[in-house]
Image (cartoon, grey):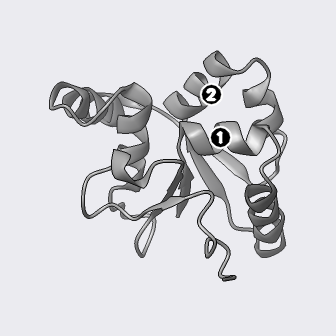
Amino acid sequence: MIILDTAAVGALAAGHKTLSLLTANMAATRDQLYVPALCLMQAEADSDGAARRVLGFPTVTVDPLDAIASVTVGTMIRDGYGGPDTCHALYCALPRAEFTGLSILLTDDEDRYPPGTLAISVDSPGMLGFF
């Protein structure tokens, strides 16, 4: 599962070349990019129209903040893991029964997330497998 945090959502909305290529490649494979609802909310608060531009991509799916997620995200915020959007992204990266393998969290700051989280910079030269 590939997850976009607030910074990655903002970058995709602004036309980030590598993220746009990733989105196009995922359309060919019918895979999805997951955007935590609170990251989408924060990206829209930061930049008018960001949510509309990102939701226009057919490979983007919003991960909702349901009852279980809201309690877990609230606990993460209280425990000092970051703000609501950062903690929702971190929650989405946790192992889930419906997804096999390790989730990848795309961000602009890999150090924002705790050890054990596979966070990759959107500007990493090897993000798409090219060096």
Q: Residue at x 54, y 53 (%)?
A: 3
Percent across and percent down for residue 127 are: 62, 71
Q: Residue 62, can we see it?
A: no
Residue positioned most to the left: 79
* Label 1 crowd bin: few (<14), some (14–19), many (20+), radius 10 Å: many
Residue 32 in percent (x, y) is at 67, 60
Residue 9 badge? 1
**Circle nearer the N terminus (1, 2):** 1
**Would you say residue 73 is visible in this rendering?**
yes
Secondary element under disc 1, as helix, strand or loop, is helix
- Circle 2 packing at 10 Å, graded few (<14), some (14-19), many (20+), is many
Left or right: 39 in relation to 85: right
For image coordinates 33% across by 56% down, the residue present is 94
Do the residues under discs 1 and 2 have CB atoms within 8 angstroms? yes
Q: Give the residue drawn at x 80%, y 29%.
A: 52
Name the one closer to the observer, 122 or 4: 122
- 51 sits left or right of 2 in the view: right
Label 1 is placed on what type of residue? Val
Q: Is residue 25 left or right of residue 121?
A: right
On screen, 94 above or below 90? below
Residue 92 location (% of width, % of height): 42, 49
Residue 55 point in image, percent of width and height: 77, 38
Name the image quarter holding the C terminus. Answer: bottom right
Residue 88 quadrant: top left
Q: In what element is the residue under mark 2?
A: helix
Residue underneath mark 2: 43
Residue 24 falls in which quadrant of the image? Answer: bottom right
Q: Which mark is residue 131?
A: none
Above or below: residue 71 compared with residue 61? above
Amino acid at circle 2: Ala
